[in-house]
Amino acid sequence: MRSPRTRFSTLFLASALSLAAAAAFAADPIKIGVAGPFTGGSSSMGVSMRDGVRLAADEINKAGGVLGRPLLLVERDDEAKNERGVQIAQELINKERVAATVGYINTGVALASQRFYQDAKIPVMNNVATGSLITHQFDSQPENYIFRNSAHDSIQAPMIVDEAITRRGFKKVAILADSTNYGQLGREDLEKALALKGVKPVAVEKFNIKDVDMTAQLLKAKEAGAEAVLTYGIGPELAQIANGMTKLGWKVPLVGSWTLSMANYIDNAGPGGEGARMPQTFIQEPTTPKRQSFIINYLKTFNPKNARIDSPVSAAQGYDSVYLLAAAIKQAGSTEGPKVKAALEDLKAPVEGVVTTYNKPFSKGDHEAITANIPVFGEVKGQRVVYAYPDDFKKASEVRVKDPNAKGALTATKK
Amino acid sequence: MQILTQLIYSGIALGMIYAVIAFGYQLTFATSDTLNFGQGDALMLGALVGLTLVGLGLNYWLMIPLVCVFGALQGAVVERIGVRPAIKIKSEFGWIMSTIALGIIFKNVAENLWGRDDLKFPSPLPESPLKFLGANVLPMEILVVVGALLMMLAVEFFNRKTIYGKAVVATFNDRDAAKLMGINTGLVITFSYALSSLTAAFAGVLIAPLTLTGATMGAVLGLKAFAVAIIGGLTSGMGIIVGGIILGIAETTTGFYLSTGYKDVPGLVLLLIVLAVKPAGLFGKSAIKKV
């Protein structure tokens, strides 16, 4: 017969073990993949996005994590290259075993990489890439694991067209788009949106990444009598367009996709880049308490040059993407892909973000958190992006929430 | 007409950018039959070093000689590490791999030192365009053309008129004979590499205010310059200028008259034609390789 003493110690040992196991479980972090270009021409977006993500993850961890577990970010630089994106997707899924991935700046990289997540049933939250096709890539499959909280091109293109044609009354416009997936899909959307207004662009021109001379493209637009140039490209080349205009002494308004707010556009174009307008989901102005605390924390933590976030939109959307995921994981009570996905499609509690308050942002058939009524127009002024219309600024403290019936978006369909 | 003038101006400016880089290929080919495939990266390093010096408060014009010294040192290093061992063992291809490898290393170093974003290089001249024969030119573009021509003239003058230059030419004509005549051919080859990287670094600070400055700026430019060197002929300084201008104008005019999507095609078609019809280049002297 065992003495009570031994029995006690066995009990003690067992309970200590189970406690230790519980502690180990609590410390077991939830891995979230972060993929984006942290170097190269689109790095100002990638790095701002990553910093926004880091800020959100830090805040969540300080508040006790999700399901009692801390978030662990696994950051990978895809260099804006499709093949790197594919490698990273496989690494994050098979080696790191992430619960979900946020990121993607470049539409091409997103389209090439996210099929692996779709196959592995792991949710992807696209927080910057805007190609219309992104959330519709797997429309033919019963379950879609691809979500987005950035303003997709089917919203942006009509906004750009509306600004140029309706608000400012230009009759003749030229389109300049880069030769990447991003530029060419955007150009298609612009042409569609123009067609809805019965306008045909007077010139549609293309340029390559790293092109240093835009004379031919600009001359064609000028000769065709364009009154405004609509752009779809990224910072450095957009700056070359503005510089080329200065050189030709031909100054017409630039209206383009949100990338005209990139720091490397503003810096490289200098005074020639002033006045460019673009749709923005977020402008670095403390218009709500949430936005104010986000801006203050961001500036304090990452200390960007001239107290200007390199890409405020990317930072804000990166930040929000983590909160959306965290809310879904919390609601699902699990990190299993299908459950998190189901929770995302049916978020019960509103998520207060920087861009907007996400009240039922996604549903089974709608994986876009941003609708046409949310973005406003920004303008480059004094080397930063400000509200283009004082009215928008005045009303900025009223958070624009998702309106599934908002007019103005092109219907995106899988080709 | 005004359009055509504008296109030609831009084409010439673009072509001269290619030509100054291509000129560096020609310099090393002339002495050692080898090329520095890291020429684009030498240009990038020159531009970034220049940008840093300007950032430290140095005047643009004072910065140029310093960048040239840096370029010369960098070229000498490339020759010592990458090319000399290959020449010593008479390897036909070793230098190709080693100059490419060094180029990649330089690019990675630059990415770590300066980041991978494109930076703005402050223009030393006013950025407002000048009107000239009905079309616009930037003062900086004129500087590129003039600077490139002056640099090439200086090098040509050096090669033809000075005793050291004659050593370079002698080394090109027959390396072994030159050695027997008491010329330190090894030193001449090192010197030609130093000179070639010096021109690249100079080209870098010359064009940086027009293009953007960053670790990746050399790649596309280096490749286009290579095409120019082949079209013009690797043995002719004149050919390099003409080749550059042809390629530059071909790009801008096809961009306008055909389609901007095809603007790189005519230049490359020309490259293929030249290779098929006159492999030594439009102005090159075809050399018979003795085996």
Image (spheres, grey):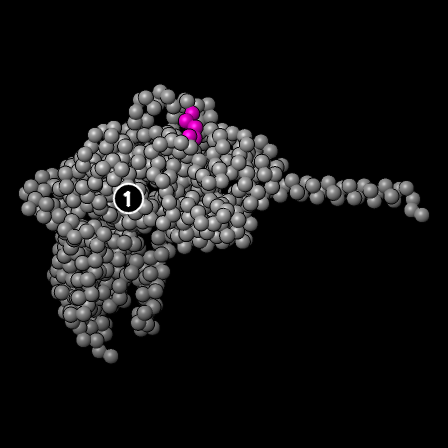
In the rendered view, tell whether residue B45 sits above or below residue A249.
below
Q: Position of residue A306 (x, y in %)?
A: 36, 31
Q: In the depicted view, which residue is nearer to us: A52 or B166?
A: A52
Quadrant housing residue A311: top left
Q: Is residue B23 visible?
A: no
- For this orientation, the residue located farthest to the bottom is B291
State left or right for residue A62 relative to residue A398: right
Task: Look at the magenta stretch and give its main secondary structure.
Answer: loop
Q: Which residue is mark 1?
A: A187
Q: Amino acid at mark 1?
A: Arg
In the image, which residues are magenta?
Answer: A399-403
Q: Residue furthest right?
A: A1
A349 relative position to B270: left or right: right
Q: Nearer the viewer, residue A15 or A366?
A: A366
Q: At 33% across and 33% down in the image, what residue appears?
A: A408
| Residue A300 shown left or right of residue A166 in the figure | right
Point out residue A366 in the picture as x, y percentages from the top left corner. 45, 39
Q: Secondary structure at mark 1?
A: helix
Residue shown at 17%/56% (left/top)?
A: B247
